[in-house]
Amino acid sequence: MSNRTFTMIKPDATAKGNTGAILSMINAAGFRIVAMKMTKLSKEKAGEFYAVHAARPFYGELVDFMSSGPITAAILEKENAVEDFRKLIGSTNPAEAAEGTIRKLFAASIGENAIHGSDSNENAAIEGNFFFSKLEQF
Ligand code: CMP
């Protein structure tokens, strides 16, 4: 699994019609789509996905936002996937994101930041398996 990462195009990017442009950047950066679906998280599921942040002050806001509209979830494959993908999306806070990154181009704020990327190989596997059965991972 070390060559795989997990991503979610978040409700803000979906609502603004940026899903296609973001997927195009992901493909152009050399990632292969191994699994993909458009879906909408319930509050319960969003809370479960972000359970690691449950003690943070922004947890309630994060769960509300992530369950506010459709998202596109995907597993991506590339050598050094986790690190390279985090470079492609840029800093969590778009104000600090490098030029040309997905968050610099499409994110409005630290909360509504367009896209998620796993922060470790271990979490990439956990997060991918949260959304996709083995039969849905190619
Ligand atoms: P993500 O990479 O999906 O992982 C956790 C998310 O929590 C993060 O992106 C942000 O969208 C959100 N987050 C982190 N810090 C804050 C904050 N200070 N206020 C609101 N949301 C935050």
Image: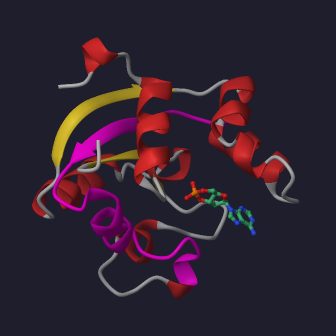
Could you say where residue 1 lies in the image, as x and y percent from the top left?
A: 29, 41
Quadrant placement of the C terminus: top left
Instruction: Answer yes or no: is residue 9 visible.
Output: no
Could you say where residue 2 lies in the image, as x and y percent from the top left?
A: 29, 49
**Relative to residue 7, is residue 57 drawn left or right?**
right
Q: Within the image, what quadrant is residue 50 found in?
A: top right
Q: Residue shown at 60%/27% (left/top)?
A: 41
Q: Residue shown at 71%/47% (left/top)?
A: 52
Whether the magenta-drawn stretch holds residue 130 is answered as no
Q: Residue shown at 45%/56% (left/top)?
A: 120
**Relative to residue 44, is residue 86 drawn left or right?**
left
Could you say where residue 71 lies in the image, as x and y percent from the top left?
A: 47, 37
Q: Residue shown at 28%/68% (left/top)?
A: 84
Q: Give the range drawn in magenta.
A: 68-95
Q: In this view, does 74 lie above or below 62?
A: above
**Relative to residue 20, is residue 10 drawn left or right?**
right
- Farthest top residue in view: 135
Q: Within the image, what quadrant is residue 45 found in?
A: top right
What colouring style does the render use? secondary structure
Could you say where residue 82 lies in the image, as x and y percent from the top left?
A: 34, 59
Instruction: Answer yes or no: is residue 65 visible.
Output: yes
Q: Is residue 66 above or below residue 120?
A: above
Whether the magenta-drawn stretch holds residue 77 is answered as yes
**Relative to residue 122, is residue 43 drawn left or right?**
right
Q: How many labels does the image show?
A: 0
Residue toward you, 93 or 123: 123
Q: Quadrant of ligand 1?
A: bottom right
Residue toward you, 98 or 109: 98
